């Protein structure tokens, strides 16, 4: 009799546990559902539609005509696409190291137990939540022919003129804008990774008389590898998708010196109304990003 009661109690307990887990899972799905619906409607479905559109031509009346791989064949012989691909690669090579290095530096600066340090962290994060259009307008004035950057260059003996009017300086100028608008987000990611490093490692390094640079090189940097890989992927994707600052500051000029792939998608689709051709460029950008991410994962992220 006692054994039967124990079995019944255990069975009742298992039922309650199963019901509780099912209820918790149901509540979880309820809370996730709004984001999942928005992600599906505004991300997944448009991406699928854009991929399908790359195999077609669409006129202003909305009529769709399937053309197969014609849009992609046109890309291979399009000098404008090749130009925009080179511009985007150069921009990425300039921007990504700049953003990551500056983010690491700022994370190191705010990784301290000082009074009011949270205020500094909030201030450094402000550019992330600032409108890209507003940032673009401000930096357009800074790098313009009447802006302070021209005056600073003149004081240094450099006759640069407007940075945005120079095909040589326009990409570094846009890279500085990207650094300003992106470093706060990466800084918080790297700061969280730094705060997770056990202090015992630093204490052991100090016992071995390791200096500041040695502690950073042999303790901080290796343990930041997962966060650095994540930030690297984010910034690479962000560099290939840059549009707001280009649209506001340069319009793809001068002489297509800032004509990035994302701007080409916008230009072909909305200025020339070639939605199928613009979608084909978008598909190519997606493939390039996937390939670069796989390479980065093989080289840097395999341990994580």
Image (cartoon, grey):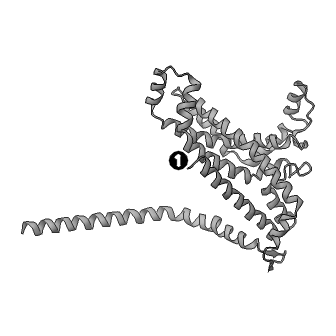
Q: Is residue 174 visible?
A: yes
Relative to 264, residue 169 above or below: above
Query: How many circles with numbers are drawn on the protein?
Result: 1
The residue sitting at 64% across, 64% down in the picture is: 43
- Quarter of the view holding residue 270: bottom right
Relative to 161, residue 62 above or below: below
The residue sitting at 75% across, 73% down in the picture is: 53
Residue at image mark 1: 303
Q: Is residue 274 visible?
A: no
Residue situated in front as seen by the camera: 98 or 246: 98
The residue sitting at 55% across, 21% down in the picture is: 211
Relative to 287, residue 247 above or below: above
Question: In the visual, does 55 lie left or right of 9?
Answer: right
Label 1: state its secondary structure.
loop
Instruction: Give how far across and how far down residue 282 sits, in percent.
Output: 75, 63
Q: Residue furthest left?
A: 1
The N terminus sits in image quarter: bottom left
The residue sitting at 46% across, 65% down in the picture is: 29
Residue situated in front as seen by the camera: 179 or 41: 179
Relative to 292, residue 47 above or below: below
- Quarter of the view holding residue 68: bottom right
- Quarter of the view holding residue 63: bottom right
Instruction: Give how far across and how far down residue 77 sits, in percent.
Output: 87, 64
For disc 1, the neighbor class at 10 Å (few under 14, some 14 to 19, many from 20) is few
Instruction: Give how far across and how far down residue 161 sits, in percent.
Output: 92, 35
Instruction: Give how far across and how far down residue 210 sits, in percent.
Output: 53, 22
Question: In the visual, does 106 lie left or right of 4?
Answer: right
């Amino acid at each position: 009799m006692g054994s039967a009661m124990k079995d019944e109690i255990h069975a009742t307990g298992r039922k309650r546990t199963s019901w509780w887990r099912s209820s918790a899972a149901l509540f979880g799905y309820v809370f996730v559902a709004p984001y999942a619906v928005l992600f599906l409607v505004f991300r997944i479905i448009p991406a699928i539609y854009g991929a399908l559109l790359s195999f077609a031509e669409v006129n202003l009346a909305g009529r769709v005509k399937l053309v197969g791989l014609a849009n992609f064949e046109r890309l291979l012989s399009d000098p404008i696409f090749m130009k925009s691909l080179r511009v985007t690669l150069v921009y990425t090579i300039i921007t990504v190291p700049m953003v990551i290095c500056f983010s690491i530096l700022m994370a190191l600066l705010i990784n301290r137990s000082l009074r009011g340090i949270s205020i500094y962290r909030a201030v450094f994060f402000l550019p992330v939540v600032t409108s890209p259009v507003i940032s673009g307008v401000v930096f357009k004035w800074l790098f313009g022919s009447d802006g302070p950057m021209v005056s600073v260059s003149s004081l240094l003996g450099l006759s640069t003129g407007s940075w945005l009017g120079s095909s040589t300086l326009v990409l570094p100028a846009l890279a500085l804008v990207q650094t300003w608008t992106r470093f706060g987000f990466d800084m918080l990611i790297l700061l969280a990774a730094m705060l997770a490093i056990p202090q015992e490692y630093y204490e052991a390094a100090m016992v071995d008389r390791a200096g500041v640079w040695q502690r950073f090189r042999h303790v901080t940097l290796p343990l930041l590898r997962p966060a650095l890989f994540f930030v690297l992927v984010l910034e690479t994707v962000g560099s290939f998708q840059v549009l707001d600052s280009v649209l506001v500051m340069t319009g793809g000029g001068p002489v297509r010196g800032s004509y990035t792939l994302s701007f080409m998608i916008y230009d072909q689709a909305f200025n020339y109304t070639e939605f199928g051709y613009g979608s084909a460029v978008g598909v190519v950008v997606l493939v390039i990003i996937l390939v670069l991410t796989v390479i980065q994962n093989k080289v840097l992220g395999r341990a994580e």
